[in-house]
């Protein structure tokens, strides 16, 4: 019998399907549902998908519908989805002291979207160690506020759930139906949540690069200027772009919502500033809401579309097309308009293959946005802004909604489920696909044709 070989291009998306199916079956267990509630197949499928895809859109209240077992299942799915199914399976193999074949290493490399000829398993171990330490610290810091508010047992559980959810950019919680709205006047909780969201969205490559540079700078007493210069071009780009997006997004939200009675109109000036930054950060695939999303102005919603579409940074827990992808796509166009024959970032040339990859990811992602919005609106009765907000949020695994998710019919829920899945595996699969070696298909060189554009 011929052995079936599945390439990483297909295996990675299928691994998420397997996790979603398993999660659905587990959530269908009666004990996973709180007493007095019942869970149908579509609700279980939607919840498993939003957990594995670390999106955060929910059709039932997490804190009320699911029992403790159900919430534990959801949290495990969020952790697996945030780190990646293949990465988690690989870590289990490491703990079980199983040997990695060349195929296993290639699959892991493609799953993490990194190019490491050596030290791949050490990198994976470092990622898991860093993640659990960060989430643990986050849980302890949340407990300072949640334990006095909710009691020891529920407070500790809410702290753990909130920390993992924030770091994995899932946006779900077990406190109540209003997300972070009830805490929008608490600088401690708001800032802590923003820090965890940001750390998860920066990417592990940036983490380790910054940590190494700081260690060397302390050891050799480098000046801040020298320290910054020693960062890799990737880390510099991620940090600069992330800061620009957060600050500019916060500025738009601040002025657009300043006098809006449905969101921040009645807040004090410090709270308006803090909530503006929180909204900007949560747009970057986090999904927590500190103000009612259905009360946002059109200007804020449009800004949200842009920030959600871009998302976080590569090799992290965030979704979207990623900051580096968006910038390379933009710089490619600017280079052409300026008459340059190459694209450079921090005086480093970007390869043509990388530019093609970025263009392909942006094009396919934008196509998916338009198609899924059209399909959702085809069901009727949904305004364009609400439909666009829901779909961009789902495809970018953000989890924000203008109070639409729980009111979707079966058709609408299926569209959102597909969108969440495509959003979670899309950038990964496309990156793997376009980085694969396909030179054997390009041996023939055709003569140049004459075309006119523009």
Image (cartoon, helix red, strand yellow):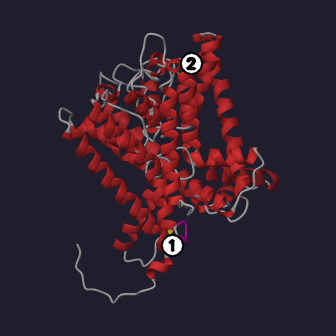
Residue interval drawn in magenta: 345-351
Residue 224 placement (x, y as % from top left) = 68, 53
Look at the image and tell me in which quarter the C terminus lies.
bottom left
389 vs 440, nearest the viewer: 440
Badge count: 2
Near-viewer residue (419 or 237): 419
Q: Name the residue at the right extreme.
A: 219
Quarter of the figure with the N terminus: bottom right
Q: Percent from the top left, x then y, of residue 165?
A: 54, 32
Residue 140: image quadrant is top right
Nearest to N terminus: mark 2 or mark 1: 2
Q: Residue at x 51, y 33 (%)?
A: 23
Horizontal placement of 313 versus 207: left or right?
left
Q: Residue furthest bottom?
A: 447
Against 361, residue 275 (above or below) is: above
Nearer the observer, 302 or 54: 54
Q: Which residue is mark 1?
A: 351
Query: Is the Cβ of the residue at disc 2 closer than 8 Å to that at disc 1?
Result: no
Q: Residue 296 falls in which quadrant of the image?
A: top left
Q: Residues within 10 Å of mark 1 (few under 14, many from 20)?
A: few
In this rendered view, identify the residue nearer to me: 451 or 67. 67
Which image quadrant for residue 88? top right
Label 2 neighbourhood size at 10 Å, few (<14), some (14-19), many (20+)? some
The local secondary structure at tag 1 comes to loop
Distance CA(mark 2)–CA(mark 1): 50 Å
Task: Kindly identify which residue carries mark 2.
Answer: 68
Secondary structure, mark 2, is helix
């Amino acid at each position: 019998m011929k052995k079936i070989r599945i390439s990483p291009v297909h295996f990675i998306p299928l691994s998420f399907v397997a996790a979603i199916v398993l999660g659905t079956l587990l959530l269908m267990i009666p004990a996973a549902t709180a007493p007095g509630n019942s869970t149908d197949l579509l609700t279980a499928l939607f919840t498993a998908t939003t957990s594995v895809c670390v999106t955060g859109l929910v059709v039932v209240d997490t804190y009320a519908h699911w029992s403790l077992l159900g919430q534990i299942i959801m949290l495990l799915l969020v952790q697996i989805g945030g780190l990646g199914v293949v990465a988690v399976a690989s870590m289990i193999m490491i703990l079980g002291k199983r040997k990695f074949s060349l195929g296993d290493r290639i699959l892991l490399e493609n799953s993490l979207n990194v190019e490491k000829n050596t030290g791949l398993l050490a990198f994976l171990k470092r990622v898991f160690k860093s993640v659990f330490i960060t989430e643990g610290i986050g849980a302890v810091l949340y407990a300072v506020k949640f334990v006095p508010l909710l009691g020891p047992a529920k407070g500790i559980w809410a702290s753990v759930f909130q920390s993992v959810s924030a770091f994995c950019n899932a946006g779900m919680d077990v406190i109540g139906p209003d997300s972070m709205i009830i805490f929008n006047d608490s600088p401690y909780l708001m800032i802590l949540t923003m820090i965890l969201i940001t750390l998860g969205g920066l990417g592990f490559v940036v983490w380790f690069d910054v940590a190494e540079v700081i260690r060397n700078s302390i050891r050799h007493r480098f000046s801040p200027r020298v320290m910054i210069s020693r960062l890799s071009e990737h880390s510099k780009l991620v940090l600069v772009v992330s800061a620009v997006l957060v600050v500019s997004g916060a500025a738009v939200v601040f002025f657009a919502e300043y006098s809006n009675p449905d969101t921040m109109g009645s807040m004090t000036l410090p709270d308006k500033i803090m909530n503006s930054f929180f909204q900007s950060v949560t747009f970057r695939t986090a999904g927590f809401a500190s103000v009612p999303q259905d009360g946002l102005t059109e200007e804020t919603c449009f800004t949200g579309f842009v920030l959600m579409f871009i998302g976080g940074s590569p090799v992290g827990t965030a979704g979207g097309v990623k900051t580096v992808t968006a910038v390379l796509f933009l710089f490619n166009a600017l280079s052409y308009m300026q008459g340059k024959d190459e694209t450079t970032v921090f005086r480093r040339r970007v390869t043509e293959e990388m530019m093609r990859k970025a263009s392909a990811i942006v094009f396919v992602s934008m196509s998916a946005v338009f198609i899924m919005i059209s399909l959702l609106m085809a069901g009727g009765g949904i305004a364009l802004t609400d439909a666009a907000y829901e779909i961009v949020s789902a495809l970018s695994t953000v989890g924000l909604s203008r109070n639409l998710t729980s009111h979707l019919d079966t058709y609408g829920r299926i569209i959102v489920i597909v969108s969440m899945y495509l959003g979670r595996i899309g950038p990964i699969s496309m990156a793997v696909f376009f980085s694969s070696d396909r030179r054997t298909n390009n041996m023939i060189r055709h003569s140049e044709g004459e075309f006119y554009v523009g």
